[in-house]
């Protein structure tokens, strides 16, 4: 079963707790904890992803908007959700401050370059272009023919190749890295999620082999 | 503090070193097993499509350390670059307790009798250093069998008429047929081929106190979550440690081997887990670091007697670096062929390992391990864009309807394809790093084309409606996880590095036990041969030890 976070969960009512018309119940510690944690945690946990804007680790708001639009052309939503819904940009953002920090400059300049090219070709920001125009620009990046000074500092093709690869990673990789939300791409392909059994210690509990003694010669 | 003298130091705990440590510790010798990596467990390294030994986009899960151990790669045009473990050009295998056997796909092939006599059978192709092994299949047969039983192999090779003679069947049966097997097996039979179940170092039934395979798709490249995959880390190394005669030291980076005045190995210099330099003296040193690291270590151990590196009087250490080029085909079917049952690879043929007209050697062909969505996303046939709705449609169309057949082509060793130590670049501990250069033999391209032809034929017979060839088209340095050949085994000290017992020609008490010694790497995954050679060399060491031959 997958939790579909697109549907907002019913708001947990705590009014009964305060309602004077109900018979007074002694407030047990357990009950208090359940109610308070539900109230405190429900809101942030179940907010849909777009509402998390402003919490980017690497991108600023303009950059984030551009990259959302770029990724959505690379894996567009159709009968199945696309890159945005799957959290691909969250994946890229997270990795750029972690394992992919070596690509920070490439993304900074690349996104400026996309803006330049977009203005030069269509006189508008990338996010304001039509889908056809956006694809047109992406093909120009792919073939290294996009206009703009920035592309003299950084290769458009290299930026495009990285962006496509990272988008594919975020969409088709494991959900634990922030992309592929709710295993959406695996569901699209008809794949079950990882049957992870548990976190096992070094010696599996069913094993008849005991952990060997650690010796020092 | 001076470390206590021991009988044996084994450097590297992979397929070769793990076996040697166990054999010698059980014989009562005090063994120190040095490993540069750590214990890797499935609770630390999860089923992660992006971080594993196969895709490595977020790094390798089984080592080596990503910011400490670079290599230098020289491409065919002569351009040098510094590469890191996650890069393809690094030719990484693994660095952890158990080495590559923790994360391998675990195919457990015996080489065929012909693979040990390639020069006698085929002559030497121009530009190659193809040679016979100094030992034959018959010498190794008992040790193949020992490896199959002690470490644990499943499968059924009885329908294979081309296999070398064997005395006993495999200890475990194959897994039940997957959907791919149900399709491919009858197709191969219709073609007159001889399909059979791949021997695998994987429990299909409870064996050695561990359970059978849970059949998930995270197999080749991953740490087995239910411990059904048999590596040295959960078999022989455990036995070695339990014997009370073996001490395993993890996170130990070996810098060099020192000799005494008589030219015998005296001690191993290494950096321990706290990065302190240590000296471990021993009567016997066994180098099992894999073809790249073993050669690097020997070359990094020059002395007055061997100014060019240990055992390198004739410039053969690090030469003949080889691996396997994989080629085959990718077929689309009009029906669902995917059942999400691991390990994926199950059915193989050895009809084309030898006797191919006009070709030297050959390859096995088998269906491929389970593909992860990220991998399939990068396998789009020519003409399908890498992005956009067309790519998404490709994923939806092909993922559950495709079968991949691949095989490791037997490589002709090339003298100029080699490991050196880089004159400038050093690792975190200040040790010169491995420098990889050269390209593989042009004959490999012909072999790969042949492999793709046969794979295409097989897929079409099985009913594929569209077949895309996955074929090597240009020469490239070949090493990777099947790296081999850099300390060749031979009878002539001028054209090899170790003798037929894996002992360095020039040093009485130094052995190299890993795929480095393979004179030829066969058309098969090499791990069971590494294990068999390790049992074979250990047998020699145990027999030679009390008689004083080694002291």
Image: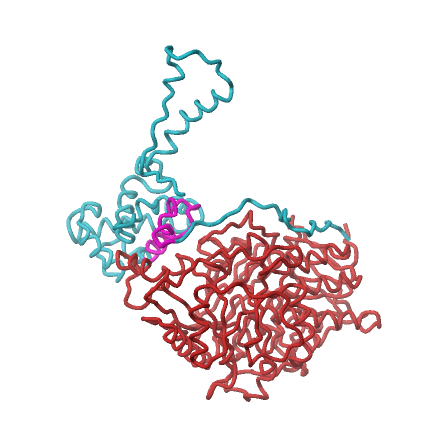
Chain colours: A cyan, B red
Instruction: Report the side of B65 relative to B541 (left or right).
Output: left
Q: Quadrant of residue B184?
A: bottom left
Q: Is residue A192 above or below residue B256?
A: above
Q: Give the residue at x 45% y 54%.
A: B49
The answer to whether residue B175 of the structure is visible from this angle is: yes
Q: Is residue B540 above or below residue B101?
A: below
The answer to whether residue A156 of the structure is visible from this angle is: no
Q: Is residue B349 above or below residue B88?
A: below
Q: Quadrant of residue B101?
A: bottom right
Q: Position of residue A113 (x, y in %)?
A: 26, 51
Q: Main secondary structure of the magenta part?
A: helix
- Range drawn in magenta: A161-190
Instruction: Report the side of A60 relative to B435 (left or right).
Output: left
Q: Is residue A185 magenta?
A: yes
Q: Nearer the viewer, residue A180 or B482?
A: A180
Instruction: Report the side of A171 relative to B34 (left or right).
Output: left
Q: Position of residue B526 (x, y in %)?
A: 57, 71
Q: Quadrant of residue A2?
A: top left
| Residue located farthest toward the left when viewing the structure as drawn | A123
Q: Give the residue at x 43% y 23%.
A: A35
Instruction: Report the side of B9 relative to B214 (left or right).
Output: right
Q: Position of residue B297 (x, y in %)?
A: 63, 65
Q: Is residue B549 above or below residue B397?
A: below
| Residue located farthest toward the right when viewing the structure as drawn | B547
Q: Nearer the viewer, residue B353 or B447?
A: B353
Q: Is residue B83 magenta?
A: no
Q: Nearer the viewer, residue A38 or A64?
A: A38
- On-image quarter of the C terminus of chain B: bottom right
Q: Position of residue A156 (x, y in %)?
A: 29, 57
């Amino acid at each position: 079963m997958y939790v579909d976070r697109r549907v907002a969960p019913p708001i947990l009512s705590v009014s009964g707790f305060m309602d004077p018309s109900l018979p007074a119940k002694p407030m047990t510690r357990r009950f208090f904890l359940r109610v308070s944690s539900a109230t405190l945690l429900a809101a942030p946990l179940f907010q849909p992803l777009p509402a998390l804007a402003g919490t980017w680790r690497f991108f600023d708001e303009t950059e984030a908007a551009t990259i959302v639009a770029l990724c959505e052309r690379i894996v567009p939503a159709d009968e199945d959700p696309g890159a945005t819904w799957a959290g691909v940009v969250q994946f890229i953002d997270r990795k750029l401050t972690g394992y992919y920090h070596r690509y920070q400059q490439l993304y900074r300049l690349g996104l400026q370059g996309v803006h330049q090219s977009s203005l030069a070709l269509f006189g508008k920001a990338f996010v304001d272009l039509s889908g056809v125009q956006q694809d047109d620009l992406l093909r120009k990046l792919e073939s290294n023919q996009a206009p703009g000074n920035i592309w003299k500092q950084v290769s458009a093709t290299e930026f495009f190749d990285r962006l496509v690869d990272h988008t594919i990673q975020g969409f088709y990789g494991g959900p634990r890295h922030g992309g592929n939300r709710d295993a959406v791409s695996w569901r699209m392909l008809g794949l079950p999620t990882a049957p992870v059994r548990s976190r096992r210690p070094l010696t599996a509990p069913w094993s008849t082999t005991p952990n060997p003694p650690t010796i020092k010669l | 503090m001076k470390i206590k003298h021991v009988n044996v130091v084994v450097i590297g705990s992979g397929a070769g070193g793990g076996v040697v440590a166990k054999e010698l510790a059980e014989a009562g010798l005090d063994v120190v097993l040095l490993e540069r990596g750590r214990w890797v467990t499935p609770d630390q390294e999860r089923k992660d499509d992006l971080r594993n030994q196969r895709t490595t986009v977020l790094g390798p899960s089984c080592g080596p350390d990503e910011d400490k151990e670079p290599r230098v790669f020289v491409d065919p045009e002569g351009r040098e670059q510094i590469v890191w473990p996650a890069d393809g050009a690094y030719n990484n295998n693994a660095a952890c307790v158990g080495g590559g056997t923790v994360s391998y796909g675990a195919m457990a092939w015996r080489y065929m009798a012909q693979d040990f006599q390639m020069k006698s059978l085929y002559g030497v192709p121009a530009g190659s250093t193809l040679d016979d092994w100094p030992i034959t299949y018959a010498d190794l047969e008992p040790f193949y069998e020992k490896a199959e039983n002690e470490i644990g192999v499943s499968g059924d090779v009885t329908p294979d008429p081309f296999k070398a003679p064997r005395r006993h069947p495999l200890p475990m049966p194959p897994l039940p047929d997957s959907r791919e097997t149900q399709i491919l097996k009858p197709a191969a039979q219709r073609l007159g081929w001889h399909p059979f179940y791949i021997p695998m170092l994987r429990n299909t039934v409870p064996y050695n106190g561990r359970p059978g395979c849970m059949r998930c798709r995270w197999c080749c490249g991953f740490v087995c979550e239910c411990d059904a995959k048999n590596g040295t880390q959960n078999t022989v190394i455990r036995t070695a440690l339990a014997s009370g005669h073996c001490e395993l030291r993890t996170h130990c980076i070996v810098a060099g081997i020192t000799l005494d005045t008589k030219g015998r190995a005296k001690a191993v210099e290494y950096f321990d887990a706290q990065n302190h330099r240590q000296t471990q003296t021993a009567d016997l040193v066994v180098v099992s670091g894999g073809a790249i690291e073993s050669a690097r270590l020997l070359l990094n151990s020059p002395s007055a007697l061997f100014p060019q590196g240990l055992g390198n009087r004739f410039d053969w250490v690090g030469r003949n670096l080889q691996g396997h080029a994989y080629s085959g085909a990718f077929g689309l079917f009009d029906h669902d062929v995917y059942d999400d049952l691991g390990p994926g690879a199950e059915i193989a043929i050895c009809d084309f390992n030898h006797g191919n007209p006009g070709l030297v050697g050959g390859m096995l062909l088998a269906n491929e391990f389970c593909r992860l969505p990220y991998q399939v996303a990068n396998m789009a046939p020519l003409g399908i864009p890498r992005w956009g709705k067309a790519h998404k449609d490709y994923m939806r169309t092909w993922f559950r309807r495709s079968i991949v057949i691949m095989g490791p082509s037997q490589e002709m060793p090339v003298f100029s394809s080699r490991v050196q130590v880089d004159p400038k670049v050093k690792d975190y501990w200040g040790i010169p790093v491995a420098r990889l250069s050269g390209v593989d033999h042009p004959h490999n391209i012909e072999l790969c084309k042949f492999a793709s032809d046969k794979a295409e034929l097989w897929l079409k017979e099985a009913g594929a409606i569209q077949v895309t060839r996955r074929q090597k088209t240009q020469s490239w340095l070949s090493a990777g996880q099947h790296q081999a050949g850099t300390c060749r085994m031979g009878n002539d000290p001028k054209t090899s590095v170790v003798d037929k017992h894996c002992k360095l020609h020039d040093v009485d008490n130094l052995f190299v036990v890993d795929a480095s010694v393979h004179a030829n790497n066969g058309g098969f995954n090499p791990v069971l041969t590494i294990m068999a050679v390790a049992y074979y060399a250990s047998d020699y060491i145990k027999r030679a030890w009390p008689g004083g031959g080694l002291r």
